[in-house]
Structure formats: structure tokens, C-alpha cells
Image (spheres, helix red, strand yellow):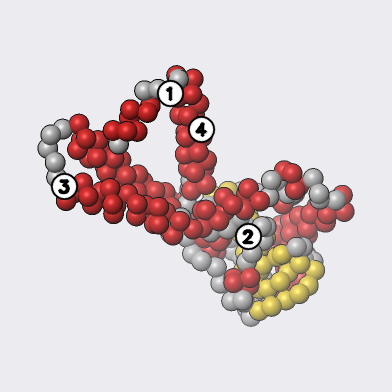
Amino acid sequence: MTEVIGRTNHISPLLSVIDILVVAAIFYWILGLVKGTRAVPVLRGLAIILVSSVALLIIFQITPFKLRALDFLLQRALLPGFVVAIPVIFQPELRRALERIGTSTTFSALYSHSETDEITKLAQNITKAVTDLADRRIGALIVIERETGLEDIADTGTRIDACADPGLLESIFMPNGPLHDGAVIISRGRIVAAGCVLPLSENMRVLGERGTRHRAALGVTETSDAIAVVVSEETGVISVAQNGRLLSNFTEERLMRFLTAALKPS
């Protein structure tokens, strides 16, 4: 620790400012990844432990009081343990970060005009089905796969390999049908499974009084980059979950604009 402090005295003020800005940008990016997810309380707890540990190490360096056992525990066990613990605890968030890096704007230029047309068509089909269901107050939950694969979730339902046709989507969610209570998974413009079971979110601050469909929609977007569209059977309100956030009161026009923009490669 003394050597590190000594080295900082030889760093120019400009490099120090750049160093601080880079570190701040990294932390800001990390906070953006976990904001609104279940990882926030965990990150807060780890930050408290880390700050306390560093503070104790500094105190041990500048004071004559030495608690050798505690000092050994902090330097050789607790702080190195963070290196192992962080990838395990924040595995979904780290996976999302790597996916965002892998799908940079460099690769989006490779998408053809025909693929853009397919995205627009998919957005139109989903919007029509959802608004028709909302008008009749029929509950629905449609999950649109993006970069994160949802094969494990699709395996919990009934496999369907069909075009995402509005009529087919509406028929799946008809009351008393065998698949109407689960979620529909759409991948590459096709319905791959229906009646699927999704992970439920515990973020009641975002959910409020909403029911199981909204919990499931939020849950799947907390662990993947998918987009989930929900229709409330009680109110007929259309909501969209993305990145652990839940937006409500979508009109047909607003939903169409949102899906068209969100499904385009970033």
C-alpha cells in the first residue's frame, strides 16, 4: 500500500484526472447495467464491505497499531475473494455486458434492408395481436428474444415452429386454452414455444400491485436482454418490460414505434 501511495506522487495532474475519469466511467457503466435489477442491493453490500476493508488497511499503514490477524485476513483472504465472488454473483449482468460489447454498431451495419423489413413486420404482427387482446381484456405475455438465448425457457413450454402471425398469437391466449397461462417465446421472427414458465421478479418497488404476468415479464428481462410485452386481463393495459424496467399504458401507435426501435440491432 505504501508503494502504491509513493508512486502516485510521481504521476502528473493531467494523468491523474484522466485516471479518475476512466474509473468513474467504468463504475457508471456498471451501475447502468444493474440499475433496476436485483443486483443493486448486492452491489451496495459489496461496496460497503470493500470500502470498510480498504479504510482498515489504510489505518493499519498510517498508525502504529497493528492487528496482524485482521490485516492478514483483509489482504490475503477478503479482498482477493472479491475477484472470485464478483463474476459468480453478477453473472447475468456480466453476460449482458459482454453481449452488448459483442453487438456493437460495427456489426449492425451488416444487417440488410430485408432484415429491417422483417423487424418492421414482426413489430406490426405483435402490435396487432396485443392490441386486439387488450381490447377484449384477454391476458397475454409475449417474450421477444434478442441476443441472449432463451432455449432453456422455451424448453419449459410446448414447442411451436410457426410464423408470428397475429391470428395465431391471439388464439394461443384464448381463455381456457391449454397454453394461455404461459408465455410465448418469439425468436428470429418465429414463435418457437408457448405456455412457457418464466423466472419471477422480486422487485416489488417496480411491480407495485401488478400480478404474476408482470412479475414474469420483469423477471425474464432482469436476466436477459429480451423484451416482454404484457396485456393485463383485469384492465386491458399494455405494458412492456425491458432491462429490468416496466413501462405501461402503451397505445397501438406507441407500441409499434417502441418495438420497431427496440428490435433493430444496436
Residue farthest right in this picture: 114
In terms of sequence position, does the residue under pointer 4 or pointer 2 come before the other? 4
**Label 3, label 2: how far apart the Cα atoms are:** 47 Å
Q: Amino acid at mark 4?
A: Val
Question: Whole-percent x and y of residue 14?
Answer: 49, 20
In terms of sequence position, does the residue under pointer 4 or pointer 3 come before the other? 4
In the drawing, what numbered circle is on residue 22? 4
Question: Whole-percent x and y of residue 55?
Answer: 25, 37
Q: Residue at x 66, y 67 (%)?
A: 185
- Label 4 Cα neighbours within 10 Å, binned few <14 / some 14-19 / many ≥20: few
Question: Whole-percent x and y of residue 86?
Answer: 42, 54
Camera-side residue: 179 or 110? 110
Question: Whole-percent x and y of residue 70?
Answer: 18, 49
Q: Amino acid at mark 3?
A: Arg
Asked if disc 3 and disc 2 are in contact, CB closer than 8 Å, the reply is no
Q: What residue is pinned by disc 3? A: 68
Q: In the drawing, does residue 44 fall left or right of residue 20? A: left
Tag in front: 4 or 2? 4
